[in-house]
Image (cartoon, rainbow, N blue to C red):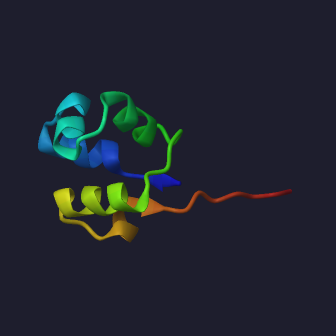
Amino acid sequence: MNNIIRQLRADQGWSQAHLADLLDVSRQTINALETGRYDPSLPLAFAIARLFQQPLEVIFQPAVHTDL
């Protein structure tokens, strides 16, 4: 799943550690989310959307797979 968490975080001037504290997760979780190695649980996705005051579909987009 693609997301714009890194951009939203940077727009706020927050570090990964600060965002992790706000969401009650580890900094490593934020890093994994931002790099696409981890898809959040629904509760975490909703918490991220609430924090940034954005709809889920703005923050998270399905990854596009092209099978040729």
Instruction: Write the residue at 24% across / 66% down.
Output: 54
> In the image, is 67 to the left or to the right of 60?
right
28 or 15: nearer the eye?
Answer: 28
Q: Quadrant of residue 46?
A: bottom left
Instruction: Write the residue at 36% across / 51% down.
Output: 4
Residue 45 % position (x, y):
36, 58
Residue 58 % position (x, y):
35, 66
46 or 53: nearer the eye?
Answer: 46
Q: Quadrant of residue 6?
A: top left
User: From this viewpoint, which residue is outermost toward the right?
Assistant: 68
28 or 56: nearer the eye?
Answer: 28
Residue 51 % position (x, y):
18, 57
Instruction: Write the residue at 18% across / 36% down.
Output: 21
Q: Is residue 37 above or below residue 54?
A: above
Residue 19 % position (x, y):
21, 39
Q: Where, quadrant-wise, is the C terminus in this rendering?
A: bottom right
Q: Is residue 47 above or below residue 39?
A: below
Instruction: Write the residue at 40% across / 40% down.
Output: 34
> In the image, is 33 to the left or to the right of 48?
right
Q: Quadrant of residue 52?
A: bottom left
- Total marks in image: 0
